[in-house]
Amino acid sequence: MRFRLVLWLLFFVLGMFMGDRYGLPGWARSAADGGFSAIDAWFDKLDEPIPESGVETEHQTSDAEPSASDPAPPARQPASDDQGATATSELRINDAGLQIIKDSEGLRLEAYEAGGEWLIGYGHRRTAQAGMTITEQEAEQLLREDVRASEDTVRRLVTVPVNENQFSAMVSLAYNLGESGFSRTTVLERINAGDYDGAADGFLIHNRVRVNGELQSVPYLTERRQKERDLFLTPA
């Protein structure tokens, strides 16, 4: 604006000395008027604000690819796989756990009496009665049916995640001791406290039976508890 004012004043002073409009000859007036219009347009352009750097102009596209200096968007991280134990609701006793029960209980295809009650197969009680006989396949089926109650016992009483081998070892223990007996075991107490190593050692404690009013360790129970402990400690 200051330059425009100076130029206009210069032409005005010249006109004062030279006469006529702006001191210009008549033949040049139209040219002068055109020149003044051009000067006006030039100054109007100078008055336009200069766009700030980084501001998008009308010839730029909003979907332009980022330059090499632009930081790349963070990559989406894959969901981590669960490498730990599993909720007990998803577990069933495995073949290794069933084999411990089979080896410890023994197979009897004819009903036999023990402790004042009739048993058959792999220690099956519920439908056993005097004179009853079954096949080996029927004994297997009865065992799997009986184990379901022990599985439910472990699922209900164990409150921490365990793997398949830990679960199966505890089901074998619960099958031997019953729900009431398992609920009072050191194994259950320690595992629910998060002490997995202590729970493994707890199997070895429950190897005794009462003889003449005194608790005494029994070799076949000691062997069974060692197998259960070994299975409990085996990585799944």
Image (spheres, rainbow, N blue to C red):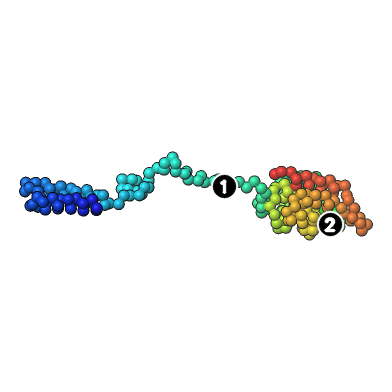
Q: Can see residue 17? A: yes
User: What x and y, as percent, mark residue 12?
Assistant: 14, 53
Residue at the extreme left of the image, as rendered: 26
- Mark 1 residue crowding within 10 angstroms, few (<14) / some (14–19) / many (20+): few
What secondary structure is found at the residue carrying circle 2?
strand
Give the Cα distance between marks 2 and 1.
54 Å
At x 78%, y 44%, the residue is: 230
At x 24%, y 53%, the residue is: 1
Tell me the quarter of the picture where residue 152 sits: bottom right
Tell me the quarter of the picture where residue 191 sits: bottom right
The residue pinned by badge 1 equals 79
Q: Nearer the viewer, residue 112 or 197?
A: 197
Q: Nearer the viewer, residue 1 or 94?
A: 1
- Image disc number at residue 118: none
- Mark 2 residue crowding within 10 angstroms, few (<14) / some (14–19) / many (20+): few
The residue pinned by badge 2 equals 117
From the viewer's perspective, tell me whether residue 231 is left or right of residue 31: right
User: What x and y, as percent, mark residue 195?
Assistant: 75, 52
At x 74%, y 43%, the residue is: 234
Nearest-to-viewer mark from 2 and 1? 1
At x 31%, y 49%, the residue is: 50
What secondary structure is found at the residue carrying circle 1?
loop
Q: Amino acid at mark 2?
A: Glu
User: What x and y, as percent, mark residue 103?
Assistant: 80, 45
Q: Amino acid at mark 1?
A: Ala
